Amino acid sequence: MSNDLFGGLLKGLGSFMPQDDPDTKIFTANNELNNLQKQETEVYAAIGKKALGSISNDPAYSDIINELGTIQKKLIQAENQLRAVKEEKEALKTQQEALRCPECSTVNPEGVKFCQECGSKLGMASCSKCGAINPPQTRFCGECGNKL
Ligand SMILES: [Zn+2]
Ligand SMILES: [Zn+2]
């Protein structure tokens, strides 16, 4: 990039966000502060992780190490819960997709075999030859080529 072009670009940015505007200065200073605080916290965390082995039997740290243990247990629980909720959502989506009419996209109530809107056949088609589950309206099994 040539200097002229770079200068022009800076000028363009300058007119978009004036450098001497107090709001811009506050925004920039705030950003810098947040960035540095984040970096500081990360370094503290790195020190803590490194020191953990050598202080794990030190009674002076027992409270803080217990707290860490409690948080880590809760962390695992929270991760498990998140996974369970995601799986539940996936299952619900799959269920709804199975009830969604391939022709008109109407989501039909559970147990309905034909679309209540347009009469198309609903539900996954299982292959009589290999048992593979195929999407509704499939004419040939995607697994073995059997005519459905
Ligand atoms: Zn339909
Ligand atoms: Zn098949």
Image: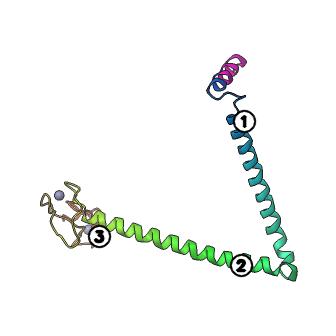
Distance in Å between CA atoms under marks 2 and 3: 47 Å
Which residue bears the numbered disc 3?
A: 132
Distance in Å between CA atoms under marks 1 and 3: 63 Å
- Image height of 69 relative to 49, above or below: below
Residue found at x 21% / y 59%: 101
On the rendered image, what quadrant is the C terminus found in? bottom left
Residue 7: % across, % down: 70, 20
Q: Is mark 2 within 8 Å of ligand 2?
A: no
Which residue bears the numbered disc 2?
A: 69
Of badges 2 and 1, the one in the foreground is 1
Question: Could you tell me the amino acid type at mark 1?
Answer: Lys
Distance in Å between CA atoms under marks 2 and 1: 42 Å
On whether residue 9 falls in the magenta region, the answer is yes
SS type, badge 3 = loop
Q: Is mark 1 within 8 Å of ligand 1?
A: no
SS type, badge 2 = helix
Residue 87: % across, % down: 44, 70
How dense is the environment of label 2, judged by Cα within 10 Å: few (below 14), some, or many (20 and up)? few
Which residue occupies the foreground of this view, 105 or 26? 26
Range of magenta residues: 1-11
Which residue bears the numbered disc 1?
A: 25
Which residue occupies the foreground of this view, 91 or 148? 91
Q: Which badge, 2 or 3, comes first in the chain's sequence? A: 2
Q: Which badge, 1 or 3, comes first in the chain's sequence? A: 1
* C-beta proximity under 8 Å, tags 2 and 1: no
Q: Is mark 3 within 8 Å of ligand 2?
A: yes
